[in-house]
């Protein structure tokens, strides 16, 4: 019998070589896995987006400093320059000068936000004046009013209701529209839209053309529909409320200088990519119909309609006039599982997967640790705890005759 202790042993370098070869073979197999490749690509694109965001923030900071020096040197001349209007708040004198009323009693009022999307610059309000003249000539006497401060759109909408206007037209983005509905809720004055913002979610949802020439045709030939409004605390929303991750993204983007120079979408993508990897879930408590549920959540979407961010659908069963809110709670899994939920929402799949819980309610109260921020229709309004309710039939809207029937439970 051979003695095992005397058997020849492989050279140490051969053993190490085999181990290295096995490791390389394992890594090759992992790299060939489609999921691994997708993960690497996603990480690479996130890093690139963050680098570009840092560069743009640096460039815009330099432009801001240059603008401040120019303003000091040129005084009044700079204050009326188109570039200055892009970087700073609307010039109130300019906005007031662009107010216009027809010679006959007005039946409609345009409320314009001079610093919203395509309204920036010196021509936006002039174009709206031409639109008002066109509407007046075609049988809908229309006046133009421009906002000059935060919350002014709410006041102008309430004035229109008190004056008996049949229609108030929000000219701007979804934030302007949200301000306008605060003054119209509970009245018979309908809201129309001239989409001039960055994303224009409501216009995309309901099928209103994004071009001014086509959109004004809807104001003349569209139909009136009565829809519900959601309510977050004391603030109404037409489309949706967001809690947690998406509200944190909105809050950071609103504070950033990129929004003022027309790069809000780029900043939103970069910020969402960064937070998507780092944001931690919070402990959430839902109180619905006397029941309390506790869970860990990254984000909550409370929808009155379906479209989110102009491209995704989380509340895919929402109906605008059914007296219910659709609530989606997205769990706090790893980044791959989070990406899966967002991918399904982007592809508008029937199911968002096991990491999303779907409910339909009339009222829900949310509490969290730590307190999560809350946004409605793209504007930050506060943080949890907060109660979300439905206000059935609280708003009249002007929509195209071919508006998606899936959004309504009643015929026009």
Image (cartoon, rainbow, N blue to C red):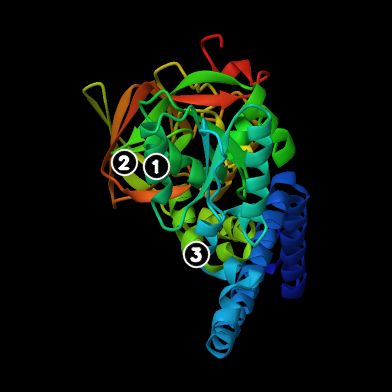
x and y percent of residue 412 in the render? Answer: 56, 11
Question: What's the CA distance linking mark 1 and mark 3?
Answer: 47 Å
For the point 49% across and 55% down, the residue is: 249
Left or right of 16 on screen, residue 161: left
- Disc 2, SS: strand
* Relative horizontal placement of residue 161, taking residue 12 as reference (left or right): left
Sooner in the amino-acid sequence: mark 1 or mark 2: 2
Give the residue at x 46% y 22%.
227
Q: Looking at the rendered structure, which numbered label has been put on residue 11?
A: none
- Return the disc, 1 or 3, that comes first in the chain's sequence: 3
The reply to whether dot 1 and dot 2 touch (C-beta < 8 Å) is: yes
* Residue 43 showing in the rendered view: yes
Neighbours of disc 2 within 10 Å: few (<14), some (14-19), many (20+): many
Q: Mark 1 and mark 2: span between their CA atoms?
A: 6 Å
Give the CA separation, mark 2 to mark 3.
Answer: 47 Å
Give the SS element for disc 3: helix
Left-right relation of 113 to 349: left
Q: Nearer the viewer, residue 19 or 243?
A: 243
Marks 2, 3: nearer the viewer: 3
Q: Secondary structure under badge 1? A: strand
Q: Is residue 341 visible?
A: no
The number of numbered badges drawn on the structure is: 3
Q: Which residue is mark 3?
A: 93
Q: Residue at x 55, y 29 (%)?
A: 306
Q: Quadrant of the N terminus?
A: bottom right
Q: What residue would you read off at disc 2?
A: 284
Q: Quadrant location of residue 273?
A: bottom right
Q: Position of residue 349 (x, y in %)?
A: 63, 27
Between 90 and 133, the one lying in front of the other is 133
- Dot 2 or dot 3: first in sequence order is 3
Give the residue at mark 1.
297
Asked which quadrant contains residue 344, the reply is top right
């Amino acid at each position: 019998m051979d003695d095992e202790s005397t058997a020849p042993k492989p050279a140490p370098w051969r053993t190490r070589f085999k181990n290295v070869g096995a490791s390389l073979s394992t890594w090759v197999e992992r790299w060939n896995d489609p999921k691994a490749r997708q993960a690497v690509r996603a990480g690479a694109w996130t890093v690139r987006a963050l680098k570009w965001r840092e560069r743009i923030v640096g460039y815009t900071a330099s432009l801001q400093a240059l603008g401040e020096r120019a303003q000091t040197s040129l005084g009044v001349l700079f204050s009326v320059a188109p570039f200055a209007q892009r970087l700073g708040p609307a010039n109130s004198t300019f906005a007031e000068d662009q107010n216009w009323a027809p010679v006959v009693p007005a039946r409609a009022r345009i409320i314009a936000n001079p610093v919203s999307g395509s309204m920036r610059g010196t021509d936006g309000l002039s174009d709206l004046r031409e639109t008002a003249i066109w509407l007046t000539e075609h049988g809908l006497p229309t006046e133009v009013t421009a906002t000059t401060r935060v919350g002014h759109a709410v006041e102008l909408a309430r004035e229109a209701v008190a004056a008996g206007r049949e229609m108030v037209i929000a000219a701007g983005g979804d934030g302007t529209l949200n301000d306008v509905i605060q003054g119209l809720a509970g009245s018979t004055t309908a809201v129309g839209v001239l989409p001039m913002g960055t994303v224009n979610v409501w216009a995309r949802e309901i099928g209103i053309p994004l071009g001014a020439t086509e959109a004004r045709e809807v104001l003349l030939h569209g139909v009136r529909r009565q829809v519900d409004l959601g309510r977050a605390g004391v603030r109404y929303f037409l489309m949706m409320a967001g809690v947690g991750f998406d509200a944190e993204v909105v809050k950071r983007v609103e504070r950033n200088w990129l929004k003022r120079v027309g790069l809000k979408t780029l900043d939103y993508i970069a910020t969402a990519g960064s937070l998507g990897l780092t944001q931690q879930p919070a402990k959430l408590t839902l109180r619905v119909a006397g029941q309390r549920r506790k869970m860990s959540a990254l984000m909550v979407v409370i929808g009155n309609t379906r479209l989110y961010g102009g491209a995704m659908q989380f509340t895919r069963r929402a109906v605008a006039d059914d007296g219910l809110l659709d609530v989606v709670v997205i769990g706090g899994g790893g980044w791959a599982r989070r990406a899966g939920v967002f991918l399904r929402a982007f592809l508008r799949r029937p199911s968002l997967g096991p990491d999303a819980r779907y409910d339909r309610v009339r009222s829900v109260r949310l509490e969290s640790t730590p307190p999560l921020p809350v946004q409605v229709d793209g504007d930050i309004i506060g943080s949890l705890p907060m109660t979300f309710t439905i206000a059935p039939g609280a708003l009249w809207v002007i929509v195209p005759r071919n508006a998606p029937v899936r959004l309504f439970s009643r015929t026009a």
